[in-house]
Amino acid sequence: MSNRIHPTAVVGAGVELGDRNVIGPFSVVIGPCRIGDDNWIGPHVTIGTPAEHRDGPHPVGWDDELAGAGVWVGDRNRIREYVTVHQGTEHETRIGDDCYLLSRSHAGHDVRVDDDVTLACSVQLGGHSRVWSHATLGLGALVHQRCAIGPGAMVGMGAAVRGEVAPFTVSVGSPARTVAMNEVGLRRLGCPVVTGPAELSDVDLPDDVAALLKLWKDREKV
């Protein structure tokens, strides 16, 4: 099945599109970029513009000039109006599957957003940061470059993250601090509710959640 691309949208050279994608009015998608299947990309979205480096290349991507490590977008994402996703520099910027990026949210260069992540309106992800699967970031949350949001974590509106946020915790404030466990997130994934992050290793978890937490524990810190 073909993609639905509005006639005012710009899809540059080096963009690979899967099937059944929607690209709305006045959106710009610049290569190198790979977009999977069944994505809804709203009006005035920009994907693949250059990384924000003073001395980095700024190619005219909408006129088929290519530079940068690219952007990779998975399947079934909802990318709302005025969202921006920048090219990677050291590796491709990645948006996983089943994510919901609300209006004016931003993924900087080399960012990785894993599966089933929600970025509320105006969330800002600094370069090289990572948001692990099932995390939710509230209105206007700020994530400093090279920080990590753990699996299933909830970051409150207006919070400023300057380090790591542990899995399935709730963090609020500036700087962000942990105040509770994300009970809603745990229940949604079929997990028992616990009172602290350390207790997650002491309870029976669904296999997919246990595997995700093992990856978090074994990760290489940025």
Image: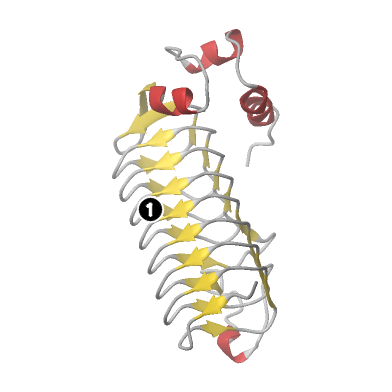
Q: How crowded is mark 1: few (under 14 residues within 10 Å), some or many (20 or more)?
A: many
Residue 162 seen in the figure: no
Identify the image's colour scheme: rainbow, by chain, secondary structure or one colour.
Answer: secondary structure
**As drawn, 220 above or below 95:** above
Q: Residue at the spot x=36%, y=50% of the render? A: 120
* Residue 110 appears left or right of 79: right
Residue under pointer 1: 123
**Which residue is nearer to you in this view: 60 or 121?**
121
* Residue 157 appears left or right of 57: left
Residue 97 seen in the figure: yes
Kind of element beneath mark 1: loop
* Residue type highlighted by circle 1: Val
* Residue 64 appears left or right of 39: right
- Residue 175: percent from left, percent from top: 34, 37
Q: Residue at the spot x=53%, y=11% of the render? A: 199
Q: Quadrant of the C terminus?
A: top right
Extreme residue in the front direction = 1
- Residue 194: percent from left, percent from top: 45, 12
Q: Residue at the spot x=63%, y=62% of the render? A: 37
Extreme residue in the top direction = 202
- Residue 24: percent from left, percent from top: 45, 76
- Residue 217: percent from left, percent from top: 65, 26
Q: In which quarter of the image is the N terminus?
A: bottom right
**As drawn, 85 above or below 30:** above
**Which residue is nearer to you in this view: 111 or 3?**
3
Please give the count of numbered marks on the rendered protein. 1
Q: Residue at the spot x=45%, y=23% of the render? A: 187
